[in-house]
Image (cartoon, rainbow, N blue to C red):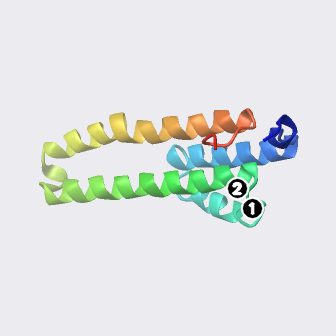
């Protein structure tokens, strides 16, 4: 692939950055609302574009984060409910280790978008 084929336009970078930002917002301040915005972006991106790559990654990342949160919630309820001391062990461990990892991955995707790069080099 030559260098010209890899150069992204400012509009593509802006769109990919916006998608990555919605992903971060879904994981932090605006859960569900930001995910809806990600889903609405699906109709605006071109197939095989920089934004499409970032959108697919963002949706997968946020669905995985939601699945992890549901799993931890089910574990908390099944292993003693909200009155157990283990509840706080699960909550703190989840947010310190797992949720932080999701946020770091979303920030990494935002930095890749700012640079005009896809998530993974193909």
Question: Disc 2 versus disc 1: distance between alpha carbons?
Answer: 6 Å
In the foreground, 51 or 22: 51
For residue 47, the mark is 1
**In which quadrant of the rendered view does residue 70 lie?**
bottom left
Q: Position of residue 64 (x, y in %)?
A: 44, 54
Check whether the beta carbons of the residues at disc 2 and disc 1 lie within 8 A of each other: yes
Q: Position of residue 53 (x, y in %)?
A: 66, 52
**In which quadrant of the rendered view does residue 14 lie?**
top right
Residue drawn at x 75%, y 37% as measured from the top left = 116
In the foreground, 66 or 12: 12
Q: Quick check: 19 left or right of 68?
A: right
- The residue beneath circle 2 is 52
Q: Position of residue 49 (x, y in %)?
A: 76, 53
Residue drawn at x 72%, y 42% as measured from the top left = 17
Q: Give the farthest residue toward the bottom.
A: 43
**In this view, 111 is above or below 25:** above
**Crowd class of label 1 (few under 14; some 14 to 19; many from 20; radius 10 Å):** few
């Amino acid at each position: 692939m030559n260098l010209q084929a890899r150069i992204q336009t400012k509009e593509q970078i802006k769109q990919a950055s916006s998608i990555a930002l919605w992903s971060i917002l879904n994981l932090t301040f605006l859960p569900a609302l930001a995910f809806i915005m990600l889903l609405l972006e699906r109709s605006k991106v071109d197939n095989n574009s920089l934004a499409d790559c970032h959108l697919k990654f963002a949706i997968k990342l946020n669905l995985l984060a939601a699945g992890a949160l549901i799993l931890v919630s089910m574990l908390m309820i099944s292993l003693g409910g909200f009155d157990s001391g283990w509840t706080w062990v699960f909550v703190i461990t989840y947010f310190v280790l797992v949720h932080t990892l999701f946020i770091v991955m979303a920030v990494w995707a935002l930095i890749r978008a700012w640079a005009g790069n896809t998530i993974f080099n193909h």
